[in-house]
């Protein structure tokens, strides 16, 4: 086999060096490229997680607000129904207990008005031997504004007096304003007759 000339050997050596250099440079370029791609992927994933987290917290906050509003509505309805049921129960034999239920959980202004109305009605309750029992039916918040709830509620009332000794069944309707900011006090009752057990005896 003929020996390579010095020039040929040198050329082959230069070619080999160039190939190794090219391979090394390509390898060095590929490493930063992979690093950049990895960094971009991390940023994208982080952005997606952040967006999902904001949506989740927003949805959770909205759910909490809805639950709180529903709980306040239920409380207002219960306050109204408890009051209406108590106010509709009376007996000519003990009007003081009825007066206490009539003015329970009402603001001082409303208490004064109800007390005056009760005093007038008590002049008829005795002679008519008026008595009534009550059973709650339902209550519903009609509106709410700044923590004040307008509630309509219905109470089943059985009324007895000298004119109806066997009793008369009726449904009393109450509309009450309840202020949660004043410890859920009743601030207004639409139709004072409703608060007096469905009206004065006739």
Image: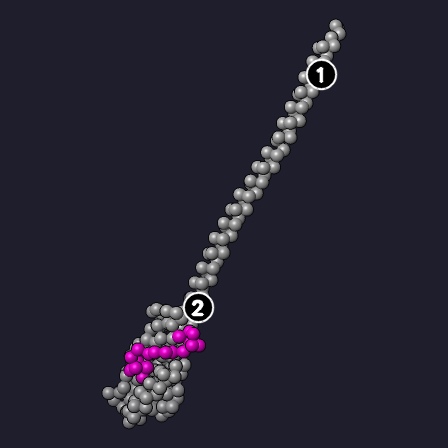
Instruction: Tell me the residue that label 2 is attached to.
Output: 71
Task: Write down the quadrant of residue 37 in the picture.
Answer: top right
Q: Nearer the viewer, residue 125 or 77?
A: 77
Q: As drawn, which residue projects farthest toward the top? A: 2
Task: Work out whether 161 lies above or below 177.
Answer: below
Query: Which residue corresponds to the image point at 37% horizontal and 72% vertical from the top-left?
Result: 149
Q: Is residue 10 left or right of residue 92?
A: right
Split into 4 quadrants, where in the image is the N terminus?
A: top right
Task: Let me know if residue 189 is in the magenta part.
Answer: yes
Identify the secondary structure beneath mark 2. helix
Q: Which mark is residue 166?
A: none
Locate residue 122, reporting x and y percent. Answer: 31, 91
Please name the residue that numbered disc 1 is placed on: 13
Please give the range of residues in magenta: 179-196
Q: Which of pointers 2 and 1 indicates the residue nearer the eye? A: 1
Q: Which of 193/92 is in front?
A: 193
Indicate the secondary structure of the residue bearing disc 1: helix
Please report whichever mark, 2 or 1, sits nearer to the chain's N-terminal start.
1
In percent of the image, x 72 and y 12: which residue is there?
A: 9
């Amino acid at each position: 086999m003929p020996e390579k000339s010095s020039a040929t050997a040198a050329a082959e050596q230069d070619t080999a060096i160039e190939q190794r250099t090219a391979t090394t440079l390509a390898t060095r370029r590929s490493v930063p490229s992979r690093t950049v791609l990895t960094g971009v992927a991390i940023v994208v994933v982080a952005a997606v997680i952040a967006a999902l987290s904001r949506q989740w917290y927003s949805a959770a906050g909205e759910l909490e607000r809805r639950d709180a509003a529903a709980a306040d509505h239920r409380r207002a309805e219960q306050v109204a129904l408890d009051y209406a049921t108590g106010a509709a129960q009376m007996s000519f034999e003990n009007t003081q207990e009825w007066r206490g239920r009539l003015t329970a959980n009402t603001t001082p202004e409303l208490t004064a008005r109800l007390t005056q109305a009760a005093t007038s009605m008590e002049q008829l309750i005795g002679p008519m031997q008026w008595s009534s029992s009550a059973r709650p039916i339902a209550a519903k918040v009609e509106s709410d504004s700044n923590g004040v709830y307008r509630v309509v509620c219905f109470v089943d009332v059985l009324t007895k007096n000298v004119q109806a000794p066997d009793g008369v069944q009726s449904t009393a309707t109450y509309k009450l304003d309840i202020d949660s900011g004043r410890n859920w006090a009743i601030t207004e009752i639409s139709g004072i007759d409703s608060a007096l057990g469905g009206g004065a005896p006739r």
